[in-house]
Image (spheres, rainbow, N blue to C red):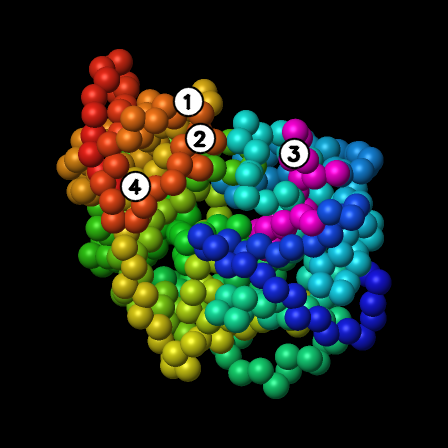
Amino acid sequence: MSAKNFVDSIPIEFSDQQIYLYGEVDGRRCRFCLDTGSSQGIVYYGSDFPYGKVLGEIKSHDANGKVSMVKVAQYPDFTIGHLTIRGYSGSLIRTSVIPQNYDAIIGFDLFNKGLCAKIDAKEQLLILTDRRDFFDDEEGFPVKYRLLRWVPQIKLSPFPGFTDEARFDTGSRRLYEMSGSSLRKLEAVFPEFGTQIEGRSYGHRAIGSFGTENKEDVSFLSLDALVIGGHSFRDLHTMTTQGHSRVGAAILDYGPVIIRPHRKEIVFQPYSESVETWVSNKQMDIAFVPQNGRAVVGLVWERSIHYQNGFRQGDVILSIDGKPVNTFAQFISFPFINGRRHRFMVMGANGVIRTIESER
């Protein structure tokens, strides 16, 4: 790093529950995604990001628990804020859907090198410093983390008397997702937790670095309270996932987060200045995944409005509002409008083509 004993306030964008910051690479502006669930950076084959020489190979685990050997490439020197970072490296990933809204990922190794940070979505700022004591006077709800494969794991409680360990993963959008294995342990010890299970389905939805997760049972949860570091998130709707449980970037909707790597500590600072935050979010009840390059319904909850409107698992999206959708990239870039019913032409698993009117 080009500076020592520094504090820098770096503008960020918090969009669609993801953290983006701009930097300069080889004289041009680049957009990075800050992903604390990635141990190091990530760049993609076929992207415009000018990664340098390949340094070797490593065994890599994605968010869904899939494992693959990947190449590691060195980033060119890049600048964020007033700081120039040299010798940074990232996994070189081959994917069928290259992200269009950012150039590369910066992972948690930025903090493992000793930098402290405060991420404030409301002020649209990342405060970055190498001064260990800079945030010592800041109040909030601290929780310790341990590093597992160089990414932070925190302990929390989705039910009184039960402790879950979750990855602090700003690459994940939702506030909290419980792993299927954690749910099975919870149900075995506390059968009464069944009252907080809204329903069950079968399918897949999460897309990791090495493809879409496998199909399995999915449970839709309505948690009375999720307690993190003594702070309660009340009336939280979520679902199970594969791999590790996760706390995602949506936590920034409710307050800033401070990362103190020398203490292995993450501090949540609620906007409410209270010991509890009411979430009362809408349950996610449909998911689209890439399959053979096309957008396909990977999961739809039988009690959802999308199911009532006609969506079924395995439906291939052919067009939306009369516009052909030939790739998954075209689907995710389609200009959906919140609250508007769109006309989907789909082909079911039986080969029958039908039209569905529904919100996205």
Q: Mark 2 or mark 3, which is nearer the start of the sequence?
A: 3
Disc 3 residue type (three-letter): Ser
- Can you tell which mark lies on residue 47? 3
- Please indicate whether residue 51 sits to the left or right of residue 122 in the image: right
Q: Which residue is mark 1?
A: 326
Residue 46 colored in magenta in the image: yes
Q: Dot 3: what SS?
A: loop
Q: Residue at x 46, y 23 (%)?
A: 293
Q: Quadrant of the N terminus?
A: bottom right
Q: Nearer the viewer, residue 100 or 258?
A: 100
The correct choice, above or below, for 93 with respect to 175 in the image is: above
Q: Dot 4: what SS?
A: loop
Q: Dot 2: what SS?
A: helix
- Please indicate whether residue 241 sits to the left or right of residue 284 in the image: right
The correct choice, above or below, for 160 with respect to 358 in the image is: below
Q: Which residue is mark 2?
A: 330
Magenta stretch bounds: 29-50
Residue 15 appearing in the image = yes
Disc 1 residue type (three-letter): Asn
Residue 335 colored in magenta in the image: no
Q: CA distance from mark 3 to mark 4?
A: 28 Å
Q: Mark 1 or mark 3, which is nearer the start of the sequence?
A: 3
Q: CA distance from mark 2 to mark 4?
A: 14 Å
Q: Are marks 1 and 2 in contact (CB under 8 Å)?
A: yes
- Can you tell which mark lies on residue 360? 4
Q: CA distance from mark 3 to mark 2?
A: 17 Å
Q: Are marks 4 and 1 in contact (CB under 8 Å)?
A: no
Q: Mark 4 or mark 2, which is nearer the start of the sequence?
A: 2
